[in-house]
């Protein structure tokens, strides 16, 4: 055994112990090392259970971090492209009109409904912060007024 290898063994053991379960999660069955994490959302349907559709055209992704003060309400809108939303802090209540209301809290993630007029409101006691990711196409507005 070379001196270099013998010297490296304690360091390799220390790194393995430090990484622990993360090291085991990093390798998939094909042997490719990939980043693994907590799954926030894995779906092919929107929040109403309807399959969502990507628009035709050159793909375009836009992400926004939005903050709404307590009690603030968004303008009514209709999404024309799939939109991923994750509540980071606070409580969001979305009014879907005849389809009812849904309440989302910190940690909730979903695909917003397309083609249905709705509006959201911060119904919590702290500023509402959420991340949105629009999965659209160039030349197509992500949302429109109803």
Image (cartoon, helix red, strand yellow):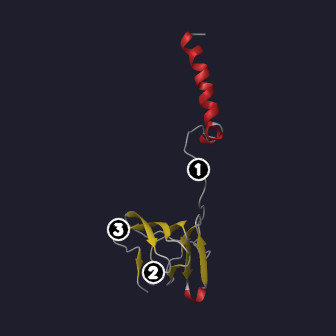
Mark drawn on residue 37: 1
Residue 23 coordinates in the image, percent (x, y) = 61, 37
- Residue 46, quarter of the rendered image: bottom right
Q: Is residue 111 above or below residue 31?
A: below
Q: Earlier in the sequence, mark 2 or mark 3?
A: 2
Mark 3, residue position: 138
**Nearer the camera: disc 2 or disc 1:** 2
Element on which disc 3 rests: loop
Residue 7 in which image quadrant: top right
At horizontal 49% and vertical 68% (from top left) the residue drawn is 129
Image quarter of the N terminus: top right
Query: Could you tell me residue 14's position as x and y percent?
Result: 61, 28
Dot 1 falls on a residue whose secondary structure is: loop
Of the pair 75 and 55, the residue shown nearer to us: 75
Q: Is residue 128 left or right of residue 50?
A: left
Q: Nearest the camera: 12 or 41?
A: 12
Residue drawn at point x = 49 percent, y = 67 percent: 130
Indicate which disc residue 74 carries: 2
**In the rendered view, does 42 fall on the left or right side of 136?**
right
């Amino acid at each position: 055994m070379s001196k270099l290898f013998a010297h490296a063994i304690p360091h390799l053991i220390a790194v393995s112990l430090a990484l622990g379960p993360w090291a085991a999660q990093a390798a998939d069955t094909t042997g490719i090392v990939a980043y693994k994490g907590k799954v926030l959302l894995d779906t092919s349907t929107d929040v109403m259970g309807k399959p969502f559709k990507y628009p035709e055209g050159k793909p375009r992704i836009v992400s926004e971090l939005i903050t709404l003060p307590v009690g603030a309400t968004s303008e009514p809108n209709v999404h024309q492209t799939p939109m991923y939303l994750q509540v980071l802090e606070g409580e969001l209540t979305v009014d879907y009109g005849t389809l009812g209301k849904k309440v989302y809290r910190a940690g909730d993630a979903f695909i917003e409904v397309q083609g249905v007029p709705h509006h959201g409101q911060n119904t919590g006691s702290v500023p509402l912060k959420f991340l949105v990711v629009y999965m659209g196409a160039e030349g197509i507005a992500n949302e429109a007024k109803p």
